[in-house]
Amino acid sequence: MVRLGFLLNTCLELSSKTGGKVEKKLAKKELIFSIFLFFFLLTISPSFASNSEVKPPVSYYLVEKELEIISATKEATSYSSVPRFVRVITREQIETWGARNLFELLKHFPEFYVYRSNIYLRAVGTLGIKQSYFSEKIQVFIDGIPLADPSNGSSFSSNNNISLNNVKRVEIVYGPMTSLYGVNACLAIINLVTYDAEDIESAKVGTAINTDSSNDSYFIKSFRGEKFSGIVSFNYREDRGPYEHFTDWMGRKTDLSAHFKHFTYYIKLNLDNGLYLDLYGVDRDNDFPVNVATLVVNGDKSYTKRKAFLNRLGYKIENEAVKFDIYAYFNWFYLKRGYNLCPADFPTCQTTYYSVEERYVKNPGAGAYAIYDSDYGKFTGGIELNVSQLYKYSLSGNFRPSEFNFLSPPQPIPYQELPSSEHLMDTATRTTISPYFQYQFLKDPAGFLLNFRLDRLSDVGTAKTFSLSFLYKLSDKWNFKLNTGRAVRAPSFEEMYIKNNPILLGNKDLDFEKMDSFMPSVEFSNDASSVKLLLYVYRLKDLIYRATVTNTGQQKWMNADKSIFIRGLTADLRRRLWNFEIYAGVNRLFSVSDLKDTTFFAFPEWKTNGGITYYGDKVIVDLNFEGYSEITKGDIKRVPGYGVLNCNFMYKPKREVKLFLKVNNLFDREISYPVYTFIAPQEPAGMVGEGRTLWLSIEYSF
């Protein structure tokens, strides 16, 4: 206790030098640093270490031999037998990093670039492609159920906080996956494998708060009967906090604030006879401090409310040779969004040029697939029917969008529901029929995987996609993999049917975006080390992007005339030394043939990750680093490079209790993201949670 008192006094003395007398209230930054320093010194102190037995080292080789991955082939397959480049992130690793949602997790991998859009929505790019803030080329699934909104193709628009609180494993499969999962699975698919009833003894509950007044809480409960079992989970997350020193591109200076709320539920029910039911829902509410043109507006009038209800009812049969799954679903999506088109300090903007739109999308569908295991390999065949319908749209406002342009604003009218001729989007229906085939053959030391799929979209056309993956075991520790193929992204309703928009117009003649890839990789693992190296080469044809079509800056969705080539490399290393693990990763983007009129390739040429983790019997301490090179590619304001240091402590005083302390951006580095040149703020504000923040959380299992 004397030693602990000395450590605490040391922290307070250090903070008092920067924040005045100890008796005074410590400033936020000094308080965060003091708490971090106290926990760090506490961890390495002899009195603490004496109560923490060293965990036995884990063999990377044995872990990869025992791991099974579902997402690469739609059935449980040994990690060492999967010909594709994959990552599997366990629950233990998620907790080691203190990742509460998917975005926080992906920051730890060099090939991913997590950023925020100009309206502060989280988005993610990978393998050299930033994408739009819809992040359409990365598709996210929860237990195989796609989270994408069919009206925009995005897995992140309905839920911009994809929680990991109920997730036991994350599987990431890289490369062209359209041939197995359908359109838009171009760069990677991410599958969240959630807890089963046997993983939770009874229930667990957790809550977290941080220094930005944000919070995150969850409840997970398992249930069992004689012939059924299941699990239910709830998550509520709020992100809030002040913005400082923001100057928009018209020179307007102000302090800003924003508020993001997410409520998510997930119910999973399995019957012994093979029937299953999955129910997933999200309710999201965001208030934005700026509008889509990055102008400061009235915060209470710029908002987005989204709801999504996804479900799947199915029946599975399985024996030694055949597996069969048939399912149906009826998904529903809702959007309500308030637009304020001009600055808050313009007198007319207090009462004019404001509109509210509502969209209703229903998405029924059905599918079936069968897997046959023979002496000649595994054969998989399936078919899917998907109907996406924007069946209802309404727009209310006090101006007519069809008359709006920035040179000659329209006359205001009384606020009212506007006729369909003034709508910003047409109602639309898309029917997709998709037969697909997969063949897998493995005979040591080699194996390969062949996929082919046909997607027939009623409003776009037909896309044929394929992938070929090859595995060769160079030795018991070394593997060589090669993945090549074609993936496609379908133009979304957002891109085809937008109209009467002074900023962006749709295009009903858009074609599929094609992506051809060539991805060789090498992997090594033994008891103490793991190495992964991936080279990626892409060709994008008919890229869907926003082309400027008027002198006032109005844009229109178009297919690019020329192909775009991307080359890069990603590598990472893990090494265990006694009770420590050292890890490092790097992504190097060699070249991109860019389009000047887009930000889709505003990706860091270099991104590095690294860290060191200490494993004890009751404590895990992780110190990690993210480094980004400057970004100059594309029609953007230059983004300077930066480095961020983060740390996470997990303490388990009892079997049923876990305590977490996490500090993001320990040294409070400035962080900024790509924004179009003509709307880039003169002085951007810090994002919520991007400055130095401290999270405290507790989890209790019973």
Image (cartoon, rainbow, N blue to C red):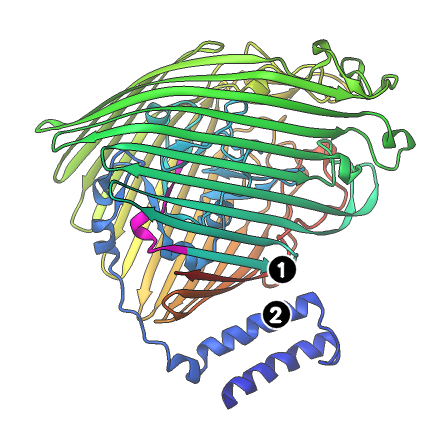
Q: Is residue 558 visible?
A: no
CA distance for labels 2 and 1: 9 Å
Marks 2 and 1 in Cβ contact (< 8 Å): yes
488 in relation to 587, above or below:
above
Q: Residue at x 37, y 51 (%)?
A: 572
In terms of image quadrants, where is residue 398? top right
Q: Which residue is mark 1?
A: 692
Q: Position of residue 102 (x, y in %)?
A: 48, 45
Answer yes or no: is residue 33 visible: yes
- Residue 84 appears left or right of 319: right
Check disc 2 and give the amino acid type.
Answer: Phe
Question: The residue tagged with tag 2: helix, strand or loop?
Answer: helix
Expressed as whole percent of the image width and height from the top left, the position of residue 442 reads 15, 34
Which corner quadrant holds the C terminus? bottom left
Mark 1 closeness class: few <14, some 14–19, many ≥20 residues within 10 Å: many
Looking at the image, tell me whether mark 2 or mark 1 is earlier in sequence order.
Answer: 2
How dense is the environment of label 2, judged by Cα within 10 Å: few (below 14), some, or many (20 and up)? some
603 vs 382: above or below: below
Side of 537 relative to 64 (left or right):
right
Residue depicted at x 24% and y 32%: 274
Read off the magenta span: 189-203
Q: Which amino acid does the dot numbered 1 rest on? A: Arg
Residue furthest out toward the front: 226
Q: Position of residue 320 (x, y in %)?
A: 12, 33
Q: Secondary structure at mark 1?
A: loop
Q: How many numbered marks appear? A: 2
Which quadrant holds residue 327? top left
Q: Position of residue 37 (x, y in %)?
A: 56, 74
Residue with the mark numbered 2: 33
